Amino acid sequence: MAAVDSPPEVMVTVDRLTFRYGARGTPVFQDFSWQVRAGEAWSIIGPSGCGKTTLLTLIAGLRRATAGTITVGGTRIERPRPETGLILQDYGLLPWATVEDNVALGLRVRRFYGPDGKHAPRAEKVLGRREAREVVESWLRRLNIYEQRAKFPGAISGGQRQRTAIARTLALQPDLLLMDEPFSSLDAPTREDLQNLILQLQREMNLTSIIVTHAIEEAAILGRQILVLGQPPNTAPVIVPNPEAGTPGYRSTSTFLDRCNQLRTLLGLKV
Amino acid sequence: MQPITHPSGSESLTTTRPDAALPAPHPLRLALHQTGRQLLNLALAIGIFLACWVALAAYLDREIMPYPWQVIPVFVKEMQGSLWDHTLVSARRVLSAIAVAVLVATPVGLGLGQIRVLNRIFSPLIGLVHPIPKVVFLPVILVVMGIGETSKVFLIALILFFQILVVVRDEAASLRPELIQSVRSLGAGRRALFRYVYLPASLPAVLTALRVSVGTAIAVLFIAEQYSTRDGLGYYIVTLTWQRLRFAEMYAGILAMSLLGLVLYLVVDVLERIVGRWRLAGDA
């Protein structure tokens, strides 16, 4: 897995990763290598217990690899990297803070530490209070939750909660966006709405994104590359290219249906 | 076994969009409104209380049970004199005990709630010690800690400590790991987690514990002030007035002690409402 110098540059390198829960037990990953280039949109799909969330939390720096290394943006990951954004399925918002305060949280944490390179990017100037408020307001408007800004997470809908979580993460201008089943607890129209929003943001911000999902359609809609994981141990990546993802009307093309069937076959489901 | 769920199979398409909810009143205003209604209830309660007092005094018809109009002028007069000083001394003792208990119990409760191993080791011990009426150790505490302020403050703090510890521990244990993870992913280390997650999460718990236990604290204060002191409301009520058959003055002292408890309770209650107003918004 030599680093590739020519553009597009490498964003995430997983190099001979081994990870197991506890000292014994089957490793979830064994000698697993995988690479994500800047600007790519990946989906990770697989059955429960395949390690897809584990892989995401490893990349996020919330877990340590048993062996092997993970490098993100040139940094070896041993703790959360300030330029990486993470969105979880639910429960990620502070229940006692308003929508506005939740969106501002990341910027507050940065101001709390200053640009120390460990908790906040070193190069970037930390925003002052007023600038931060402007950034927060623009994201509240951009994600259509400005009207809800004074409400608490318990008083808004699931879709609005996820919009809040997205705004909070994007307000920090991440270069890598990790999402763990972000829309699986939402109803179908809200989910489709947010999937379109993510596609739009991917285009606009040239984000590198990795989304973990258990839904085949979602994997095919959001990932221009799809990583399929199986029952542990995972030793080599199974990758399904899906370059048409993100093009308008892709959901209703026959290519989309074929791709979904291909994924079903790979996952051992009946087509 | 295919544990993969089909995304479009199970849910129905709804026409009502949850995003189109009506704007709710500002939560702070809601909390203040509630406080206003509470004050009205308080006025009503005082009226009923006075009526019961008059009825009881008329029924007993003895010196030990004077009428409110005999007590209240004495209360006003005494408050301009020594009773006010006794009240201040008692208030200082309770407030010091609250401060000590909060400052010690909150971090310990947070630690127990977040570090599962610690909780497993210490929870049985806490379960065992928590129900013991700590006031019975008053003689021991007096001997070990001396007859000064320390022993009184310590006894009350000890009682509050367990109340706060248990509630904060349970609150900290109920913080979801997803919440901690997502805040960590925003760059928060230990200090920022404490500032933005643990502290705001435990504050309402501390206030709940205080609201529940402030009455007990004052009751224990009354007992602690029977020994080795020449000030405080407990001393005023028993030694300075009751034992000298100054019943109107005694009731002035009882009134002062009741008011001390009431004011503390109300302050804690209002703070709890403001800090915990997000709970009115439903469960997140």
Image (tube, rainbow, N blue to C red):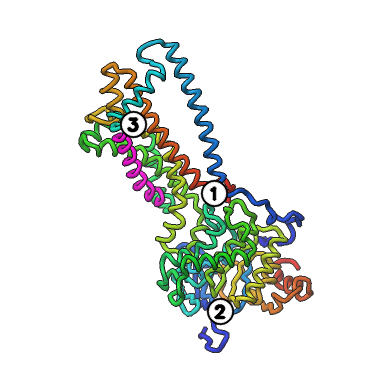
Do the CB atoms of the residues marked 1 and 3 lie less than 8 Å apart?
no
The disc numbered 1 marks a residue on which chain?
B
Q: Secondary structure at mark 2?
A: strand
Q: Is residue B137 visible?
A: no
Residue A209 lies, in percent from the top left, at 59, 73
Location of mark 2 (residue):
A35
The stretch in magenta equals B87-111
The amino acid marked with disc number 1 is Trp
Q: Is residue B99 visible?
A: yes
**Quarter of image, res A235:** bottom right
Q: Secondary structure at mark 3?
A: helix
- For residue B62, above or below residue B178: above
Name the front one of labels 1 and 2: 1
Location of mark 3 (residue):
B220
Q: Residue at x 30, y 24 (%)?
A: B237
Q: Secondary structure at mark 1?
A: helix
Left or right, A257 with reference to A194: right
Location of mark 1 (residue):
B278
Residue B235 lies, in percent from the top left, at 27, 27
Q: CA distance from mark 3 to mark 2?
A: 66 Å
- For residue B230, above or below residue B271: above
Do the CB atoms of the residues marked 3 and 2 lie less than 8 Å apart?
no
Name the main secondary structure of what is drawn in magenta: helix
Name the front one of labels 3 and 2: 3
Q: CA distance from mark 1 to mark 2?
A: 43 Å
The disc numbered 2 marks a residue on which chain?
A
Q: CA distance from mark 1 to mark 3?
A: 33 Å
Task: Please name whichever residue, B195 or A187, is drawn nearer the observer in this view of the structure.
Answer: B195
Callout 2 crowding tier (Cα within 10 Å): few <14, some 14–19, many ≥20? some
